[in-house]
Amino acid sequence: MVGKGKIDEICDILRKQTLEPAKKQAQEIIENARIEANNIIEDANNEKKKIVEEAVKEGDKKKDQILSALKLASQQVIDKLKNAIEEKFFKKGLKELIIKETSNPKIIVDLINCIIQAIEKEGIESDLSVYIPKHIGTDKINAFLTKDILDKLREKKVMEEPFLGGIKVKIHEEQLTIDITDQAIFDLIAEYIREDFREMIFN
């Protein structure tokens, strides 16, 4: 099994080559989302004021009932806008950014080298399979890998799977898959920064 120290090395490569370059672009996504959110919420507030003013004209008898319904409707609109903003700017923007960075052949090759070397240090010398995004092309990646690395693979070459970025490494003897695909990275990052994003945009 891959030890904690080796996983830390892998995480360090991900941070330096994928996450840190993406951090600046992610900040731009957040800033654009903040501006868009403020504009949308300002428009919603203006519309709410207009509706309230019209409701007041209907008379005091129905005012409380109308205002209560408007309050509920306004909250529902705001919640819907928040979800739309998160989907458009946070999820979509972050996903695109991760796919772009993890589709870089150099990063893919570096990840393969790092993971295989870490596995080897743990005493697992062979019976490995490496999978890369189908759209990258195995010839391109195989050409950048050394013969020593390719010889450690069961198929003597990398294989393809229909994900968009990153890699998967299967250790057949251990029945273990190391998943560093774009989706796995997205899930990991989103879990930790979604609340920060919501606080920055909506508070």
Image (tube, grey):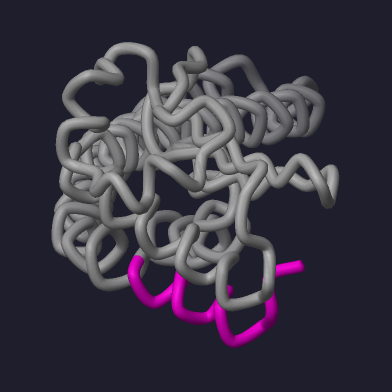
Residue 91 in magenta stretch:
no
Residue 51 image point, x, y percent: 48, 21
Residue farthest to the bottom?
5
Which is more toward the observer, 125 or 53? 125
- Image quadrant containing the N terminus: bottom right
Q: Which corner quadrant of the image does residue 129 belong to? A: top right
* Residue 73 appears in the figure: yes
Q: Residue at x 30, y 41 (%)?
A: 102
What secondary structure predominates along the stretch shown in magenta? helix
* Residue 203 appears in the figure: no
Residue 111 image point, x, y percent: 36, 55
Label tally: 0
In the rendered structure, the answer to whether residue 183 lies left or right of residue 200 reads right
Q: Residue at x 43, y 43 (%)?
A: 151
Residue 134 versus residue 202 in the image, above or below: above
Residue 66 versus residue 98 in the image, above or below: above
Which is more toward the observer, 196 or 94? 94
Q: Residue at x 31, y 62 (%)?
A: 19
Residue 179 image point, x, y percent: 61, 44
Residue 34 versus residue 96 in the image, above or below: below
Which is more toward the observer, 75 or 169? 169
Q: Residue at x 52, y 71 (%)?
A: 118
Residue extent of the magenta highlight: 1-13
Residue 89 image point, x, y percent: 33, 36
In the rendered structure, the answer to whether residue 12 lies left or right of residue 184 reads left
In the rendered structure, the answer to whether residue 150 lies left or right of residue 181 reads left
In the rendered structure, the answer to whether residue 54 lies left or right of residue 103 reads right
Residue 11 in magenta stretch:
yes
